Amino acid sequence: MKLGIYLELVLCCTEYMLQKLGMEAATVPELCYSLYKTYGTTMAGLRVQFNLINLSINCMRTLFFMQKDDY
C-alpha cells in the first residue's frame, strides 16, 4: 500500500470521528489504536461500533480518486 493512500485513509477516519461523531481530538488516537487492535483495522472497528456505512463510502471514494491520479 502506498504511504499516501494510507495517510489519506487515516486522515479520512480521523476527520470523520471529529466532525461526524463529535469526538474530542485527544481521544481519537487511543480509540483508533483500540479499534485496530480489536477489529484489525480502524475502519472496520468504526463500522461495527458505530454502525457506519457512510464512512466506508466516503473513504473509498477518496482512495479511488487518489489511485486514479497516480496513473
Image (spheres, rainbow, N blue to C red):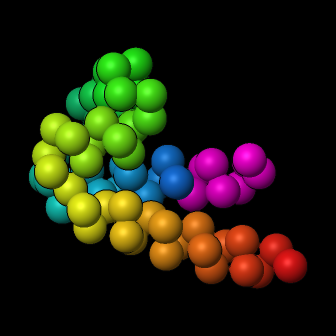
Question: Is 11 part of what is drawn in magenta?
Answer: no
Q: Quick check: 6 left or right of 47?
A: right
Nearest to the observer: residue 22 or residue 49: 49
Q: Residue at x 25, y 62 (%)?
A: 53
Start-end of magenta stretch? 1-8
Quarter occupied by residue 27 = top left
Q: Position of residue 34 (x, y in %)?
A: 32, 21
Please determine whether, in this image, residue 25 is positioned above or below residue 13. above
Q: Residue at x 26, y 43 (%)?
A: 46
Please determine whether, in this image, residue 63 is positioned above or below residue 2. below
Does residue 19 appear in this view? no
Task: Quadrant for the C terminus, please.
Answer: bottom right
Q: Position of residue 51 (x, y in %)?
A: 15, 51
Q: Position of residue 22 (x, y in %)?
A: 13, 52
Does residue 11 appear in this view? yes
Please determine whether, in this image, residue 27 is positioned above or below residue 17. above
Q: Quick check: 38 left or right of 50?
A: right
Q: Position of residue 32 (x, y in %)?
A: 36, 32
Q: Quick check: 21 left or right of 13?
A: left
